[in-house]
Amino acid sequence: MRRLAAAYACRIAGSRLYGKPLQLLDVERGVSVLEHMIALARTEPAIEAVVLGIAEGPGNDAFVDIAQRFRTLHIRGSERDVLQRLIQCGEAAQATDVFRCTTESPFFYFEMIEPVWKRHIEAGNDVTVVDGLPEGSHFEIYTLEALRKSHRQGDDRHRSELCSLYVREHRDQFRVEVLPVPESVRRLDLRLTIDYPEDLVLCRAIYMALHEQAPRIPLPRIIEFIDANPDLQALVVAYVNPVPLF
């Protein structure tokens, strides 16, 4: 029986914006980026467990508090070796497969999780992804064995936060499928990841405008909001990287 777990790698450090997963999307209601992401993953029937992969070090204890408050599984592991933490998350949940998105990207394309998971199983893929979306909206599903192979055969570059790098550099060693997304959300000109203070301003504005639909705020609705507010989009345009990951 296949079992999918969402693995959220958490650490407090950040050179451009400190404590990104703990930043508040909703200041008034006290909803952090990570809390929103936990709530969103729990609405998805395909995801049977959410595990926080928390970096070692006392500065990261705040994530343990969140795990305990939300009754979420968690592990502690190497701060640098994020790939190993993802593997530990999968093992802690007794999962066969791991759902991965970064914990500074609250608005992942949840609408595609169910069909991607179904295709992942039916096609016998090692890795199944959606790409070509606003930066920060894509996600990846790996078999746990694909993550272990990446860690085992990779080097220090791959045993890092660049969790997909080994797969992307060695596509011939894996069965990888990049699934198409609707044209309406193929928006590489947009950015929905929180790496700079300006990103946080944009994502807070989105959440505040659409919070009544939270945690399942549809990506098309988010895109409509951004298009209707070019002043907000302009805040982050200098940071947009319009290149698909895969």
Image: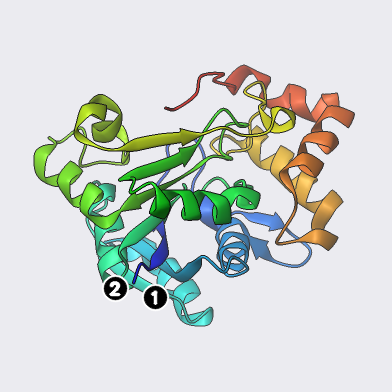
x and y percent of residue 73 in the render?
Answer: 39, 75
In the depicted structure, whether residue 216 falls above or below residue 195: below
Helix, strand or loop under label 2: loop
Which label was assigned to residue 73?
A: 1
State the residue in front, 62 or 245. 245
Residue 232 seen by the camera: yes
Q: Nearer the viewer, mark 2 or mark 1?
A: 2
Name the spot of residue 192 as percent of width and height, x first. Answer: 63, 37
As shown in the figure, which amino acid type bears the numbered disc 2? Gln
Q: Residue at x 25, y 63 (%)?
A: 88
Residue 83, percent from left and from top: 26, 48
Earlier in the chain: of badge 2 and badge 1, it is: 1
The residue most toward the right is 228
Left or right of 213 on screen, residue 145: left
**Is residue 196 toward the left or the right of residue 147 in the image?**
right
Q: Which residue is drawn at the image coordinates 72% and 26% (left, top)?
A: 235
Determine whether 64 is above or below 84 in the image.
below
Q: Amino acid at mark 1?
A: Leu
How far apart are labels 2 and 1 at the CA level? Answer: 11 Å
- In screen coordinates, is 188 left or right of 122? right
Instruction: Label 1, secondary structure: give it.
Output: strand
Numbered circle sitting on residue 94: 2
Q: Is residue 81 visible?
A: no
